[in-house]
Image (spheres, rainbow, N blue to C red):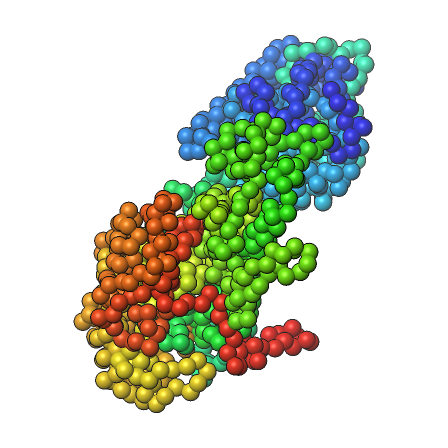
Amino acid sequence: MVDCDNCASTMWRFLVKSLTVHKDPEIGLVKLIKKKSACSSLRTHSARPGSRAGGLSRRCPPLPAGPPNGRLLLRTSSSSTGGGADTKLAVDFGKQAQKEGRVECDSSVREVVQSTKEAMVALQRRNPAVQPLLAIVQAGEDDILLEAHKEMAGKIDLNIIQICLAKDCTEDEIVEEVLKLNEDSRVHGVYLHLPPASLTSRVLNTLKAEKDVDGISDVNIGRLVRGDLSKGFVPPIASAVLDLLEKHESNLEGKTVLLVGEGHLGLVLQYLMERRGMIALKSNWSSKSHLQKQADAVVLLGGEDIDVPHTWFRPGAAVIRCGPILVTDDEHLTEMSSTPDLGHLIAAYRTQNVVHSYSRWLQEQQYRPWRLRSLKLQPMTPVPSDIEISRAQKPKSMNQLAEEIGLLPEELEAYGRNKAKVQLSLLDRLHTQPDGKYVLVAGITPTPLGEGKSTVTIGLVQALSAHLKFNSFGCLRQPSQGPTFGVKGGAAGGGYAQVIPMEEFNLHLTGDIHAITAANNLVAAAIDARMLHEATQSDKALFNRLVPTVNGVRRFSPIQISRLRRLGINKTDPATLTPQEVTSFVRLDLDPSKITWQRVVDTNDRFLRKITVGQASTEKGQIRETGFDIAVASEIMAILALADSLLDMKNRLARMVVGTSRSGQPVTAEDLGVSGALAVLMKDAIKPTLMQTLEGTPVFVHAGPFANIAHGNSSVLADKLALKLVGRDGFVVTEAGFGADIGMEKFFNIKCRASGLRPSVVVLVATVRALKMHGGGPNVSAGAPLPKEYIDENLGLVADGCYSNLRKQIQIAHLFGVPVVVAVNVFKTDTKAEIDLVCQIAKECGASDAVPCHHWAKGGQGCLDLAKAVNEATITPGNFQFLYNIEMPIVEKIRTIAQKVYGADDIELSPEAKAKIDYYNQQDYGSLPICMAKTHLSLSHMPDKKGAPTGFILPIRDVRASIGAGFIYPLVGTMSTMPGLPTRPCFYDIDLDPITEEITGLF
């Protein structure tokens, strides 16, 4: 046995399952404690004047004093003549009383064990993968207590862990251990078997109330006294006292019980006894109250090592002593080694509490109905600026919002007060929960000003949750700083349909884009460094540096073994590689002209579109041309949006192709040895960020790929988490970037393939001004005044736009078998006649419904008609189908999208595009879906062609592959992956008050 006295903070953990050693490495089992006496050798004596209660034999290791020891002694008081003896417990404590007491105690233990075992069997049927675990924290290595709990644990299939701290452990060391147990999800109960002096208020109240199976924390005692037993615990020692009293007296109602002593146990017993109809009186040790002579039972609460003569009590009264039992050498003592150890009864009740805690934990793991408290809006006219509206509303704390929507505290990682990451373990907890209804918000082909899909998404969830009382979740993309400081501004919505605080939403959020930037640029640095080292070192030198000898041992890292496997080298000992195998291993031999990976930055910086690197003399002439993309164009962003688990993300990161070797073989991030590090950089970014709308409804913000150069949707994981949280009758509303021909088509063909999810309805956002433009109106530019055609009523332009672009976008949705509800995002320049005309024609063109939306000015109240229409549209199940078979040739998949979605007559492949397609087919990439990179301003490749162009040939100038993300992306026309700043960017108006720290100018 290790001497705990010499280890202040070292602990030894022991796990007992059915009285056998449990070999779970995570528990850290060292050894099973050596079995000792269970203190069955109690000595007592005949009851006579002046005698003292017998105590623990000196052969047993002493226990700390006080109620936490769980030692009780039950005796019956008598007079000198022996009158008034209870018929069940003999007056003289002779052998007959001893025998009957054993029977009573054994009977109680059996009853408690049996009921607990039955409860365990029922719970294990529901969740066989988890077993309840009791942790015993004690000072020193006393095994006596463990033995009683081992016996109970073996009977009910309970696990026990014993933590031995030093006998002189400090309060800080105890608190540190308790905090660890609080956070250990495997532990369902904690028993602090410590000296009373160590059970300070700080220690007791550090322990989580739901794990305090001894019911000694302030929270649990308060619950008990208040009468709330649904969450608290009855202290095991109190349960044992009541059990003994009930065995002593079958009808306790009206009986008087005197509680002698101080402490929480007396308070708890007084409450429990009064609930059972007993009269509970209290006294202290110093008082020789005459009440003692009147009591039917006396409970001595411990805390004093004093002799208590039987003459203090009424003859026949039951006397129960909790705490230290005095040892005496009185010559009249009678050895009674068979006196039952009532510690077993306390242990039985304690394990019963652990099972209760486990049952509550299992219940918490189930789906929780929402109790959402919406925030009230007071819309103003005229509508203030977005940032003024956002700042005027005080958001709920994340802890409160999380509790309202059924998240567990351990599933939340707070980032300040107004946003939090949500753990992916939620998917495991709610894996049996049916998904809610899945709503996609898309749009007609937009103007450069944007048409308000984000505001419609937010207004819709505000209407569904705050007004119609449906569970609903919004799932939005995180905005890039490029548009925020460039032209478009933020993406938190607008007016009275916003995510708040909008400053935090639009600026940095929880740092996901920065993590992507760091990961992306680590790959870029690894590429250039590897090319430099390969160009300047021999095979042997490279091998020695890549596989160094450490402490006399040379071994491959796991990621290097993976590379060897891909090369067909099934060796793990570096010394056994042949010279040819060494060369294959160390030489990636990247072709500088065929490196496809670029650096990224989250700023619109046109002068980084093409750069030259390696010009310093230290790079030894390794000069090459490369460039920067905007951060959200990184393949890592697409991976973040499409991954469905941390493992999936890690595997996708490893598969990313960064270039081609001179021999024509693809080189991956795993070949570079960097994929594990990328997963580390991205491990927090994969968790969606929880925020809220102006009306207090929940929103997930996660991932932000652009729709024209990537697939343009928020993350699969955010949608999956939200669908579980809202429940079967709830709604998850997510948004696809740009028009339905781009964002929606990629949502269906790429995101839905990756997720396995199927949408219930499409909300197609249209505006009168965009329809006028598609009907033949003049072009518009961001920041420039609108031409009069967009301010004055013009029903002709509206009708032409509806019959061209709106009808085409509705038809595109119907290609996938999904019903469409048209949402007309109303602007103040729109007339009623124009709005009515749009709704009328939308229905003629096949929309299930079409309604005007006033969410910008009224919040959720202004989106009620849309919410009702969406709910109605989801009643009839859709008939979802993909546009193309994934096994079709790459060319045919491209042609299908061009003809059926864009309206092209055919496609035209450049020689470079044809060569790339042939190469991808050779590399077995042909079964990947297609992600078209084209302008968002037209259904065609020509931005100026509005409406629904026809009769054109779609040119494919290049074809690239994002193997990690899992799609092929053809480039249609000239597409830039790095936007530039305009003459007057948004940042001219953005400022900070250094006194209040308030931000101005964001929109």
Quadrant occupied by the N terminus: top right
Farthest left residue in view: 844
Is residue 516 positioned above or below 113 on the image?
below
Identify which residue is drawn at 56% across, 77% down.
987
- In this rendering, is residue 596 above or below 988? above
Left or right, 335 with respect to 920, comes to: right
Between residue 219 and residue 446, name the one nearer to us. 446
Question: In terms of depth relative to the viewer, which is nearer, 749 or 359?
Answer: 749
Residue 270, percent from left and from top = 62, 39
Q: In the image, residue 29 lies at what x, y percent? A: 63, 26
In percent of the image, x 80 and y 17: which residue is there?
Answer: 328
Q: Decide if residue 116 is in sight here.
A: yes
Which one is nearer the viewer's eye here, 389 or 319? 389
Horizontally, residue 726 falls left or right of residue 500, namely left
In this view, the residue in front, 359 or 221, is 359
Q: State whether residue 409 is above or below residue 66.
A: below
User: Percent x, y for residue 568?
Assistant: 47, 33
Could you tell whether 322 is left or right of 748 in the image? right
Picture layout, residue 988 above or below residue 133: below
- Position of residue 152 measured from the top left corner of the image (x, y, whole percent): 56, 22
Can the viewer see residue 404 in this picture?
no
Q: Would you identify the image quadrant in which residue 97 lies?
A: top right
Q: Residue at coordinates 33% horizontally, 84% vertically from top-left?
A: 778
Residue at 57% in and 40% down:
586
